[in-house]
Amino acid sequence: MLLEDKVVIVTGSTTGIGRAIAKRCVEEGARVLVHGRDQDLGREVVHSLGDRTILHIDDLGDPAACRRVIDTAARAFGRIDAIVNNAAYIVRSDIHSTDAALFDRVMAVNLRAPMLLVQAGLEHLTRSRGCVLNIGSNNAYAGEENLLAYSISKAGLMALSRNLGDTLHRHHGVRVNHFNVGWVLTENEYRYKMDDGLPEDWPASLSKVVAPIGRLMKPEEIARMAVVWLSDQSRPFSGTVVDLEQYPFLGRNPPRD
């Protein structure tokens, strides 16, 4: 097993990609702190994954929450080998609707919290020669018109990953890597697109311009990649940004329908 006896914190792991990563980590032998904001969803996930998991409910918009997450994992498991910064506030906004309060909330959850979690957990990660995996988005490269604040936060997260991937690897032996994830069919994404006005069967009628394989990616497919980068198989790589998409995002010249 790739993660036997390792301790992994996965933020935002009561739904979607985070839940799939937590599940795959357990299957690969890890003990996992499941994090989210919904107590009922969290209990459901922990019940399904068994006694190798614990639940921590907290709002990462609170700066003090990051220390609480780290302390909970350390008390429960005695060590920390990896942090997966997956939690994100995904909100529609453009130049007209992005006010200061919304912008600050997005940055607090999507960018400040990952930094503070690494900061709070660095002593443990140094001791275990552990790693960090930041889950970003291809929106970091420019972003969609209605995802302004979110896209800015993901660009910042990518810079954080590259910066810490260098400095922490040299000074602490801690690797930091980053996924820019493309379009994934999670339960939340399905609802977002329904709210945007798409029909109920929208995942079945996607153009091959956006889904060359005929469907969107699945959370489980991202999770399979995650466990490799959380494992010792990914040594010595650090500061690496991996675009997980069905097509080359940068420089693509899609056909005109």
Image (tube, helix red, strand yellow):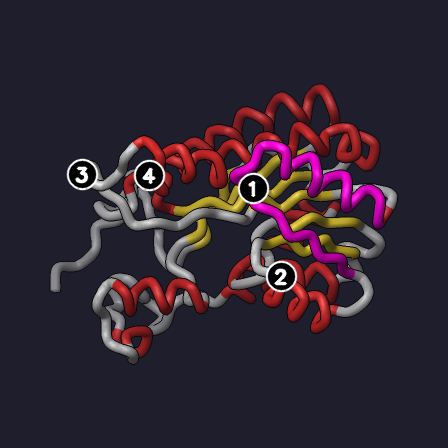
Viewer-proximal residue among 93 and 82: 93
Q: Is residue 27 left or right of residue 38?
A: right
Q: Nearer the viewer, mark 4 or mark 3?
A: 3
Classify residue 172 by image quadrant.
Answer: top right
Residue 252 in the image, given as x and y percentages of width and height: 26, 48
Residue type beneath disc 3: His
Residue for badge 1: 60
Three-letter residue code for mark 2: Gln
Q: Earlier in the sequence, mark 1 or mark 4?
A: 1
Instruction: Count the marks.
Output: 4
Q: Under tag 4, what secondary structure?
A: helix
**Residue, disc 3:** 96
- The residue segment tinted magenta is 53-76
Q: Looking at the picture, does residue 196 appear above or below residue 176?
A: below
Q: Earlier in the sequence, mark 2 or mark 1?
A: 2
Q: CA distance from mark 2 to mark 3?
A: 34 Å
Label 3 vs label 1: CA separation? 26 Å
Q: Residue at x 38, y 46 (%)?
A: 138
Taking depth in this image into account, of 126 and 11 the one nearest to the observer is 11
Precedes in sequence: disc 4 or disc 2: 2
Quick one: SS at disc 1?
loop
Q: Is residue 92 magenta?
A: no
